[in-house]
Amino acid sequence: VTLFNDDSTQNSKEFTLPGSKLEITLKKEYGENWTKQRNTGELVTQTGYVTVLNDTTEDKDFFDLFKIPFTTSRIIFSYDFTVDASIKFEEIELDVDNFKKEVTVKLPHAKHYKTTMIIDSQHVYLDEKGLFTRIDLKEQNEALKRMEAEALETAKNNGLFEKADENGKKIIESMLKSDPLLSEYNINFKYTD
């Protein structure tokens, strides 16, 4: 069974959805849009906003016996982070069953896409400099790496990936339902991982 659109054959092209049981001729615009979407790579479906606080202390000690007075440097500061979760769009497959009027979408669960520190969100709560001791750039960078990992863990513990999965299903269903040929179809989801 092949479905044709109302336009002339010059304005349509055959486009077979991956894994479809029947060949469907779709409007040229839909085929191009789906191809463009598949080429986007990542479909970011949820962003978490997290503030992470860091407390770094550096001091001098006397042969590991005691800390030398007035040599403690301490900085307490925070940064805001965005943590993005996404679905790899090229791994999404569609299985169209025209007899049952349903589309089964096979997709991976959302994964961590990236964590971004918002540079101008820094807030310094305490900045004490001790004699002969300072917190150097290497220690500062290590603190930022720890903060980034903590931001990801916090977002994960607050349901980032579950929300990303739900949003991904809504976005994909909306995309499919926007096509007149699939607007009456039931959309089902099956995770591949």
Image (spheres, rainbow, N blue to C red):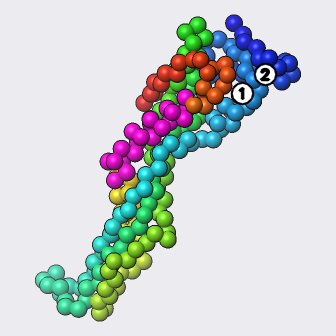
- Image coordinates for residue 56, horizontal then vertical, percent: 30, 74
Task: Tell me, yes or no, whether the two marked residues, 1 and 2, touch with CB atoms within 8 Å.
Answer: yes
Badge 1 marks a residue whose secondary structure is helix
- Residue 160: give x, y in percent of width and height: 40, 45
List x then y, in percent, for residue 31.
Answer: 71, 27
Q: In the rendered structure, which amino acid carries the disc numbered 2? A: Lys
The answer to whether residue 139 is seen in the rendering is: no
| Res. 13 mark | 2
28 to 63, vertically: above or below? above
Specify the amino acid type for callout 1. Answer: Gly
Using the image, determine if residue 159 lies above or below residue 68.
Answer: above
Looking at the rendered structure, which numbered label has been put on residue 163?
none
**Crowdedness of circle 2 by 10 Å Cα count: few (<14), some, many (20+)?**
some
Q: Nearer the viewer, residue 129 or 80?
A: 80
Specify the quadrant that holds the C terminus: top left
Region of the chain picked out in magenta, as a range: 154-173
Prevailing SS of the magenta stretch: helix
User: Is 84 above or below relative to 66?
Assistant: above
Residue at screen point 44% across, 60% down: 81
Q: Residue at x 54, y 38 (%)?
A: 88
Residue appearing at x 64%, y 36% in the figure: 37
Q: Where does label 1 land, which residue?
A: 31
**Residue 172: within the magenta?**
yes
The N terminus, quarter of image: top right
